[in-house]
Amino acid sequence: MRGRLWRATDPSLGEEERQRWVDALMDARRAVAAAKRADDAEAEKTARAAVHEAKVALGERGPVWWNDGAPDYTRKLVENTPYAQ
């Protein structure tokens, strides 16, 4: 997205667990949008925490899920990584 790399979902998650967290993530994102529309800062803070929890559970944030020693290039510009070519 916009020339940046983003971490994929942990492929070791079972399909049922992955789907549960994806559903939670989508609910949380909708809650963020609703809180913003309502100009409710506390609800937005709570919803953003739920987004973060789901993204960590999916392996898209937090500790890396791979164990091959490869560095985490999340949020780095593609042009500044070995993937530039």
Image (cartoon, helix red, strand yellow):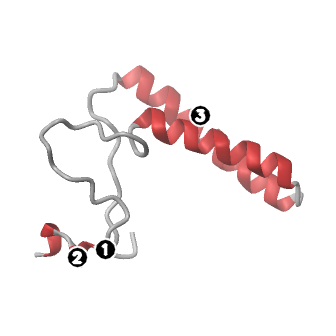
Q: Are marks 2 and 1 in contact (CB under 8 Å)?
A: yes
Q: Is residue 47 left or right of residue 23?
A: right
Nearest the viewer among 54 and 70 is: 70
* Relative image position of residue 63 (x, y in whole percent): 36, 39
- The image quadrant of residue 14 is top left
Q: Residues within 10 Å of mark 1 (few under 14, many from 20)?
A: some
Above/below status of 38 relative to 70: below
Disc number placed over residue 77 in the picture, else none = 1
* Image quadrant where one finds the C terminus: bottom left
Per the image, the residue denoted by label 3 is 24
Task: State the residue lying farthest toward the bottom.
Answer: 79
| Residue at the (82%, 46%) spot, across then down | 43
- The image quadrant of residue 73 is bottom left
Three-letter code, disc 3: Ala
Q: Tell me the element at label 2.
A: helix
Q: Residues within 10 Å of mark 2 (few under 14, many from 20)?
A: few
Q: Tell me the element at label 1.
A: loop
- The image quadrant of residue 4 is bottom left
Disc number placed over residue 69 in the picture, else none = none
Three-letter code, disc 2: Asn
Per the image, the residue denoted by label 2 is 80
Inter-mark Cα distance, 3 to 2: 33 Å
